[in-house]
Every structure is written in C-alpha cells, then in structure tokens.
Image (tube, rainbow, N blue to C red):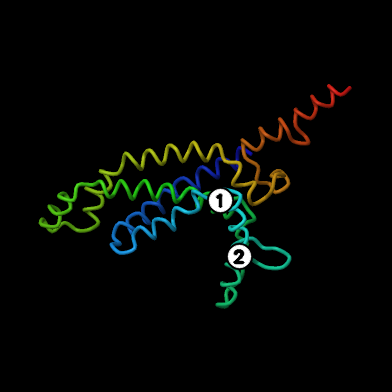
Amino acid sequence: AVKNTFLLVIITVPLSTGLALLLSLALSSIKKVKELYQTIYFLPYVTNTLAVGLVFMILFKKTPYSDGFINMIIQFFGGNSVDFIEGPYWAKMLTIWIVLPFKVLILTSALASVDQNLYKAAKVDGTSSFRTFTKITLPMIMPMISYLVITGFIGAFKAYSDEVAIFGTNLNAAGMNTIVGYVYDMLYGNSGLGKTHLLHAMG
C-alpha cells in the first residue's frame, strides 16, 4: 500500500502539473471557442469519480469481450493492443485525468492575470518565446504552480476512490491498495481489526 501510494505521488503530481501547464498555454493562445475547450476539459472534475472511472474502463480496460475502445483504434491502424490498466504505472492515468481539469482551470486563470505590458515590452526587445516563458510567464505563475504541487501531493497521499473506480473494493487482490485503502481494510475489511473486534463482541 505504501509503495503504491508513493508511486501514485511520484507519477501523477509532476505529470498532471506539467500537462496542465501545457494545456493551459495552448488554451491561452486560442481566441475562438476558448470557453468551449475549457468546459470540455473541466467536465471530468465535476463528474462523479466512479462515473469517470467507468468511462475510463470502457476506453482502456481489457475485458472478455473487448480490449477497450482505445485498443480497438490502435488495432485498426495495425498496432498491438496495450494493457493500459494492469500494473502500477498505467493505472495512474485515471488519477491524472481526474485532477487535470482543476489544474488547467487554475493555471489558465493565472496566465490570464499576467500583465500583458510585460509581453509587449519583451516583444519590442525581440525576446524569444522560450525566454519570455522562462523569464516572465513562469515566475509570474510560480505561486499557483507551487499551490497545485502541494495540494497535489496531499490529494495523492489520500488516494482511494480512483483505484476503487477501476479495480473495485478488493484492492489487495488487484495489488493496487493504497495507504487509505489499507486503513479502511484494517477497520472494516474482511481481514481487518474491525471484523476481529466484532467477532469477539459476538462471543
């Protein structure tokens, strides 16, 4: 459980923050239908976690009847199917997908709050796009990035419902238990202390 939780923290927090920054930069450069794209990206965040997990399973999980919608597309173009769900790495994609919309919203707002006069001055001086990003954009939005990283670490250490959405309540059997899942299992699970105490109380 500890190993899975730390893998979750190490993989999902940097990836989701980096992807959110790239998507936010892309959205900020779009003038038309910008609000539509923001709404589409934000939908998974306001949707129930289990519902998002079900959609994720339809897209990626192999079943006796199908290899998943994404694998069907890969096979259609002549590729080999990929086992996206099994293993400690691919399964973390769901958590990235769920937390990404909130981070995109926060970073898009942060980018919009940057003083445009700074960009105009950099353009007049002939500053490259990369230098403008590293010397103006990144320092100005760094407080928000720090906030997202800190809250991301806290959320990743509390992960439980995302794994249940894919693997069900028996996370031990799937080898995907987390610290929160372990505590829950010890209190209320079949092998936990809660059941032991209940059996003692029943006599």
Quadrant location of the C terminus?
A: top right
> Is 21 placed above or below 178 here?
below
Q: Is mark 1 on a helix, strand or loop?
A: helix
Quadrant location of the N terminus?
A: top right
In x, y percent, where is residue 141? 29, 44
How many numbered discs sit on the rendered protein? 2
> Is 79 placed above or below 84 here?
below
In x, y percent, where is residue 29? 28, 60
Q: What element carries label 2?
A: loop
The label number, if any, that marks residue 196 in the structure image: none
Q: Residue at 64% of width from left, 52% of height from top?
A: 166
Q: Residue at 83% of width from left, 21% of height from top?
A: 201
In x, y percent, where is residue 58? 62, 62
In x, y percent, where is residue 33? 34, 63
Q: Residue at 35% of width from left, 57% of height from top?
A: 35
Q: Earlier in the sequence, mark 1 or mark 2?
A: 2
Label 1–label 2 contact, CB within 8 A:
no
Q: How crowded is mark 1: few (under 14 residues within 10 Å), some or many (20 or more)?
A: many
Which residue lies under the disc numbered 2?
82
Q: Residue at 44% of width from left, 53% of height from top?
A: 42
Q: Is residue 80 left or right of residue 193?
A: left
**Type of amino acid at the residue the image marks with label 1:** Lys
Marks 1/2: CA–CA distance:
15 Å
Looking at the image, the residue that sits furthest to the left is: 124
Q: Which of 51 and 145 is in front in this view?
A: 51
**Type of amino acid at the residue the image marks with label 2:** Val
Looking at the image, the residue that sits furthest to the right is: 203
> Is 84 placed above or below 163 here?
below
Which residue lies under the disc numbered 1?
92
